[in-house]
Image (cartoon, rainbow, N blue to C red):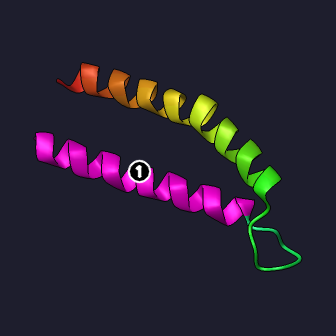
Amino acid sequence: MNVWLLALLAVGAAIMIGITLAIARNPDDKNYSNESSFRLLTVMYIVVVPATLVIIGAVLLFIL
């Protein structure tokens, strides 16, 4: 059971990082904008990730 949870968390983290990098890409040239990347990473890891962890924790608490 623990192995599946760790695998699920790893896949979720990879997807979040991939989404973050995809959104942060500057559409004009194929480089990353430092300013937009920093803002997006700040929002992702201060708001989205903790909220996701709380939801996953609540679901696991009710399941287990």
The range drawn in magenta is 1-24
**Residue at position x 61%, y 30% from top?**
46
Residue 41 position, x and y percent, is 65, 45
* Location of the C terminus (image quadrant): top left
Residue 20 position, x and y percent, is 62, 55
Snapshot quadrant of residue 23? bottom right
Residue picked out by circle 1: 12
**Residue at position x 81%, y 51% from top?**
35
Residue 4 position, x and y percent, is 18, 48
Front position in the image: 4 or 21: 21
* Location of the N terminus (image quadrant): top left
Side of 24 where 6 appears, left or right: left
Residue 63 to residue 2: above or below: above
**Residue at position x 81%, y 68% from top?**
26
Q: How many labels does the image show?
A: 1
Residue 27 falls inside the magenta stretch = no
Residue 7 position, x and y percent, is 24, 52
Q: Badge 1, how many Cα within 10 Å: few under 14, some, many 20+?
A: some
Residue 8 falls inside the magenta stretch = yes
The amino acid at mark 1 is: Gly
Front position in the image: 9 or 58: 9
Q: Main secondary structure of the magenta part?
A: helix
Local secondary structure at mark 1? helix
**Residue at position x 68%, y 37% from top?**
43
Residue 54 to residue 6: above or below: above
Query: Which residue, as the protein is rendered here, is positioned at the far front?
Result: 34
Side of 14 where 23 appears, left or right: right
